[in-house]
Image (cartoon, grey):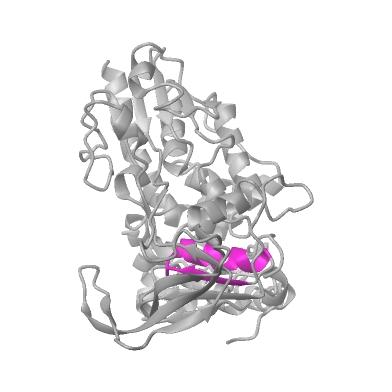
Amino acid sequence: MSEHKTTEMLQEEAAKIWAGLEGKTLTNKDRFAIPQQEMPSQEPGVRAHNMSEVALGYTETQARVEAERCIQCPTAPCKKGCPVGVPIPEFIKHIQQGDFKGAIDTIKTTNLLPAICGRVCPQEKQCQDHCTIGKMLKSPEKAVAIGRLERYVADWERANDKITVPTPKPETGKKVAVIGSGPAGLTVAADIRREGHSVTVFEAFQKTGGVMVYGIPEFRLPKALVAKEVENLKRMGVEFKTSFLVGRTATLDQLLTEQGFDAAFIGTGAGLPKFMHIEGENLIGVFSANEYLTRSNLMKAYDREHADTPMYDAKRVAVFGGGNVAMDGARTALRLGAEKVYCVYRRTRAEMPARIEEVAHAFEEGVDFHFLENPTKFIGDDKGRLVGVELLTYELGEPDESGRRKPVAIPGTEHVLDIDAAVIALGNDSNPLMAQTTEGLNTTKWGNIIVDENQKTSIPRVWAGGDIVLGAATVILAMGEGRRAAASMNEYLAGK
């Protein structure tokens, strides 16, 4: 593992590079030679025991150096990899010129959540995967760090009190209901409000932000940032109603008829946890990742002096799964006081769907990975409390439908791992409430709402997007669906 570099060390390296670049007319060859700027972060041994943000963000010098790596491709392949179509070369050009306000305003033409996207979007699989620099260097991980630059200018705008929000067009008198305040819902709210329509967002929880608040930990995405983005929408005139569960407080049909909404968008996410259906899963100490993370993130159970919600005390925690939620669960367990945290995954590190950066951070912080293993049963004591898990060893066989090699159990390799808490992070299904309370709403057998190419559902005047359609996906993919739905909804409302 490479030495952890402090912010000061990285700033010094960037300053030396910048001294050789400033005032120079750079060729593409010059830009190829500039090394990618590493993101400053807390020291692993320190951050594993606090909830403060791990990644600290670029300094101004680092941002200027990293921006100079962009060769301004005329075809902008990076933009094609962005689900919301951010004009990436244009905003980076502004950074090259030292115009940070121009950069953030350019991003906001298509994305009003840049501080969030800059932190949690899997850029390495999207915009950066298409970057010419990465392809020329035959190393995708050395692409221009687009996400880090997006984060920098978003943070710069907030730190310098330069935040501006779009001015909506004149009021149209049309009303739109947005169900769910996650990334898809907030994107729809912004794009529809821009056109002058009245927008009300209905949120089941007491806090807005959806999965960005209850799912993603504070150390990856500070909740104050999400609250600030919601505040910006309020400044645009978007209304929020919390503790309002559509399907119980009022049905979708009641919103469209009795309350007079002209259209509605469903963005309720995928909040129904999947379980393993193995022996012992109902023991005390076995949690879904949803409950475990919600208690910590939304209810701040880690703040034991001030939080009202209890948190299960555990010293040896096993997290099952290989995605971002599993990484969040494992790293949260460390911060809640676990002395040993295991991540059990039935494939190898190469097949893990989690972001490379998140897996690396987990390794650095001391999470103990058990690859090619999977549980067969949980073991309890005479009081019904979890004390261990039986694991079976696997090997990789032929690729399955996902393209990854299929894990194959090796008979007779059962062994026991002593643990006192387990977190099951195998993904989520869609909450069935909307389908159960909305006549005529077509869904798949998994409960995902069926939509057409414009995100229209089977019910007139109703659109849907995000995880309720995709299944558990990413923030930016949900936002992409939100933008597509909003465009179709605005077209409908304009002609109504």
In magenta, the rendered stretch is 316-336
Between 396 and 374, the one nearer to me in the picture: 374
Q: Residue 391 falls in which quadrant of the image?
A: bottom left
Residue 99 shows in the view: no
Identify the residue at the far front of this view.
Answer: 382
Res 237 quadrant in image? top right
Residue 141: horizontal and vertical position, in percent?
44, 75
Question: Considering depth in this image, is 91 or 435 the residue closer to the camera?
Answer: 435
Q: In this view, does 481 lie to the left or right of 459?
A: right
Residue 132 image offset from top left, x and y in percent: 36, 70
330 is within the stretch colored magenta: yes
Of residues 374 and 472, the one nearer the viewer is 374
- Could you say where residue 298 lies in the image, as x and y percent from the top left? 60, 46
Res. 430 image quadrant: top left
- Residue closer to the observer: 467 or 32: 467
Q: Which residue is drawn at 73% across and 53% down?
A: 303
Q: Number of marks in the image?
A: 0
Residue 345, can we see it? yes
Q: Residue at x 67, y 47 (%)?
A: 309
Relative to residue 392, is residue 277 depicted above or below? above
Residue visible at 24% across and 33% down in the picture: 457
Task: Locate residue 411 relative to residue 303 in the image: left or right.
Answer: left
Where residue 399 sits: x, y (%)? 21, 77
State which quarter of the image contains the N terminus.
bottom right
